[in-house]
Image: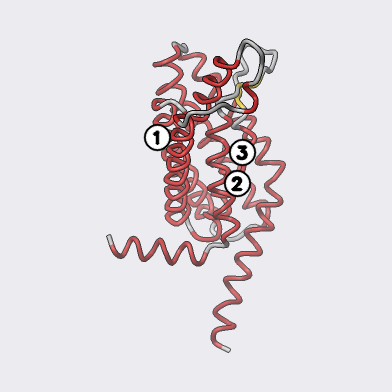
Amino acid sequence: MKKAYSDLRSLLHSVPPLLVSLLVLSVVGMNLLANKSINTGVDWLALDCGILFSWLTFLTMDVLTHCYGPKAATALSFVALGLNLLMALLFFLASLIPGVWGESFVEGSELVLNRALNNTFGGTWFVILGSSVAFLASAALNNFLNYGIGVLLRRDRGFGGFALRSYVSTFLAQFADNLIFALLVSRIFFGWTLLQCFTCALTGAVMELLFEIFFSPFGYRVSRSILRGRAAAPAAAGA
């Protein structure tokens, strides 16, 4: 236990703080914004606003896997989830504090709107539990699949290799994340059919992949910068 804690501390000291901050922020953001659905105008296309952050979560994990390996990326994913649960607790406590939200001042609807806002930020236990299980499973799948594809490539193939690893791992992991959440939450508590669960998981994964494709050049540049810095550090220490 002490060794694991020591290894985690060393990892947190070696990873750029901004990268860790982006991972934590994206996990908190995607879970909070998942409360708002997107009106796509198409019955079979089910999306939520969490997609605005979830691409950043998986791109960050791809960079971490590329630079530090799948175990390190998964460990930091656990850290991000733990901080997300802490934020969920603080949001829940805030929802219990007597008072009114600024947006609830609508004549005749103050009580209803205030209760709705409290419920949105306070969260629901089965939604938080379902999203946590789905994220842990998909994070591990993404990180180790990304690494495995890199091993099969056998050598660094530049942006093409980074992109291949990221696109395949992100699509499959996002599909798993969406499907697990849909089966654990949407099907049990909201009565979704298996077809709806599968369709939602697939369409969400496709949208996540499009975000990944668009932002992957940025992720590649970040990973190359980190790797160059890590390579230069031993040389500087030896000098």
- Contact? badges 2 and 3 (CB < 8 Å): no
Crowd tier of the residue under label 3, counting other residues whose Cα lies within 10 Å: few below 14, some 14–19, many 20 or above: many
Q: Quadrant of the C terminus?
A: bottom right
Q: Nearer the viewer, residue 133 or 119?
A: 119
Q: Is residue 214 above or below residue 102?
A: below
Badge nearest the viewer, 1 or 2? 1
Q: Disc 1 to disc 3, how far (Cα)? A: 18 Å
Q: Quadrant of the N terminus?
A: bottom left
Name which residue type carries label 3: Phe
Name which residue type carries label 2: Leu
- The spot of residue 133 in percent (x, y) is 40, 34
Q: Disc 1 to disc 2, how far (Cα)? A: 19 Å
The residue under the point 62% across, 34% down is 208
Residue 106 is left or right of residue 119, and the answer is: right
Badge nearest the viewer, 2 or 3? 3
Query: Within the image, what quadrant is residue 89 found in?
Result: top left
Crowd tier of the residue under label 1, counting other residues whose Cα lies within 10 Å: few below 14, some 14–19, many 20 or above: some
Q: Is residue 122 above or below residue 2?
A: above
- The spot of residue 180 in percent (x, y) is 43, 28
Q: Which badge, 2 or 3, comes first in the chain's sequence?
A: 3
Residue most extreme to the left: 1
Report which residue position mark 1 lands on: 133
Q: Which badge, 1 or 2, comes first in the chain's sequence?
A: 2
Q: Which structural element holds mark 1?
A: helix
The residue under the point 58% across, 55% down is 19
- The spot of residue 71 in percent (x, y) is 42, 55
Q: Nearer the viewer, residue 19 or 45?
A: 19
Report which residue position mark 2 lands on: 59
Report which residue position mark 3 lands on: 53
- The spot of residue 235 in percent (x, y) is 58, 82
